[in-house]
Image (cartoon, rainbow, N blue to C red):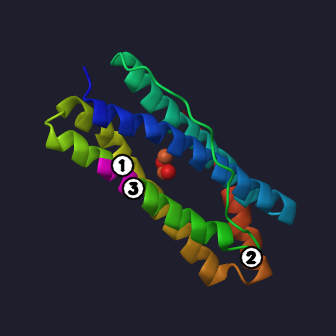
Amino acid sequence: MLNQKVADLLNDQINKEMYSAYLYLDFANFYAYKGLNGYANWYNIQAKEEMDHAIGILQYLQDNDYQVTLQAIDKPDKELKHLDDPLKYGLEHEQYVTSLIHNIYDAAHEIKDYRTMKFLDWYVSEQGEEEKNASDLLSQFELFGHDPKSLYSLNSELAQRTYTQ
Ligand code: OFO
């Protein structure tokens, strides 16, 4: 049986992961409109990964006999004007999600819920990778993105990303 507080936090996290997916679809949409299909591709795949994260938590709760309640997903609220806006918001957002995952981890740790801690280990590492990716995307853009030829190459590189489950 899962502790109620830990389980409720996990339940909320499903919504946060779905929101992340929605936010990244919004970023992809912005880039598609701007003609940067590589960046759009990167965020479309990121959105799929976020949905996988949500479903992973849903599955964990179901496997532990918790009755999941799905909540409404908020509208993405970032105003996107400049080409680097999604990259800046993306990094901030990943840092925020890391803090949420750590918060659940703390709650599990406090009550010696080793099963949930082990389950969350993957999410802790994943957040490390995602923060790094988000930070690399931003710094590459700041270094090279203002020159059209370099932006073309960056965009072409991001077009190569493929989705693996
Ligand atoms: Fe769900 O991985 Fe980042 O946000």
Label count reads 3
Which SS class for mark 2?
Answer: loop
| Residue in the image at 79% along x and 79% along y | 148
In the drawing, does residue 33 fall left or right of residue 95?
right
Classify 116 as above or below 98: above
Residue 98, numbered label: 3
Q: Which residues are magenta?
A: 98-103
Neighbourhood count class around disc 1 (C-alpha, 10 Å): few under 14, some 14–19, many 20 upward: some
Kind of residue sitting beneath label 1: Ile
| Residue in the image at 23% along x and 48% along y | 106
Classify 147 as above or below 129: below
Q: Earlier in the sequence, mark 3 or mark 2?
A: 2
In the drawing, does residue 160 fall left or right of residue 12?
right
According to the picture, the residue beneath numbered tag 1 turns out to be 101
| Residue in the image at 45% along x and 30% along y | 56
| Residue in the image at 44% along x and 60% along y | 96
* Nearer the observer, 111 or 48: 111
